[in-house]
């Protein structure tokens, strides 16, 4: 089993953890309505890539 020879310094620990932060969601703008939504998801009013994909009565 691998055992380290000496303790990692706080600086090295921070360098290792530098990529662990969560990234924000990637947003896209709907071309017809100008509304922002998550990429590859329909917008709140039912549009995806400029086309209406759901009617507003589904809820």
Image: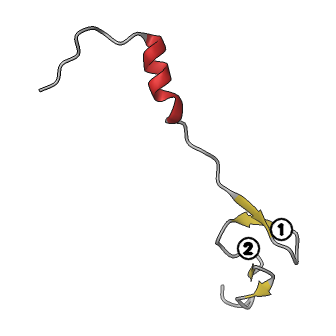
In the structure shown, which secondary structural element does the residue marked by tag 2 occupy? Answer: loop
Q: How many marks?
A: 2
Q: Tag 2: Cα neighbours inside 10 Å, few (<14), some, or many (≥20)? A: many
Q: Quadrant of residue 31?
A: bottom right
In the structure shown, which secondary structural element does the residue marked by tag 1 occupy? Answer: loop
Q: Quadrant of the N terminus?
A: top left
Q: Is residue 51 left or right of residue 26?
A: right
Q: Please give the name of the residue rendered at 60% of the width and 45% of the height, measured from the top-left corner.
A: 23
Q: Using the image, tell me which numbered label, if any, was put on residue 10.
A: none
Q: Please give the name of the residue rendered at 35% of the width and 13% of the height, measured from the top-left corner.
A: 8
Q: Quadrant of residue 40?
A: bottom right
Q: Is residue 9 above or below residue 54?
A: above
Q: Please give the name of the residue rendered at 49% of the width and 20% of the height, measured from the top-left corner.
A: 14
Q: Tag 1: Cα neighbours inside 10 Å, few (<14), some, or many (≥20)? A: few
Q: Is residue 23 above or below residue 12?
A: below
Q: Is residue 4 left or right of residue 27?
A: left
Q: Is residue 28 above or below residue 21?
A: below
Residue 2: where, in percent of width, then height? 16, 24
Q: Using the image, tell me which numbered label, if any, was put on residue 35.
A: 1
Q: How is the image coloured?
A: secondary structure
Q: Residue furthest left?
A: 1
Q: Quadrant of the C terminus?
A: bottom right
Q: Is residue 16 left or right of residue 47?
A: left
Q: Is residue 50 above or below residue 57?
A: above
Q: Please give the name of the residue rendered at 67% of the width and 56% of the height, measured from the top-left corner.
A: 26
Question: How much space separates mark 2 and mark 1, taking CA atoms?
Answer: 7 Å
Callout 2 touching callout 1 (CB < 8 Å): yes
Q: Quadrant of residue 38?
A: bottom right
Circle 2 sits on which residue?
43
Circle nearer the N terminus (2, 1): 1
Residue 49: where, in percent of width, then height? 76, 79
């Amino acid at each position: 089993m691998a055992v380290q020879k000496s303790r990692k310094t706080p600086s090295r620990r921070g360098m290792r953890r530098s990529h662990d932060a969560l990234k924000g969601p990637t947003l896209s703008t709907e071309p017809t309505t100008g509304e922002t939504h998550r990429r590859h998801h329909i917008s709140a009013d039912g549009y995806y890539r400029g086309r209406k994909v759901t009617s507003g009565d589904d809820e």
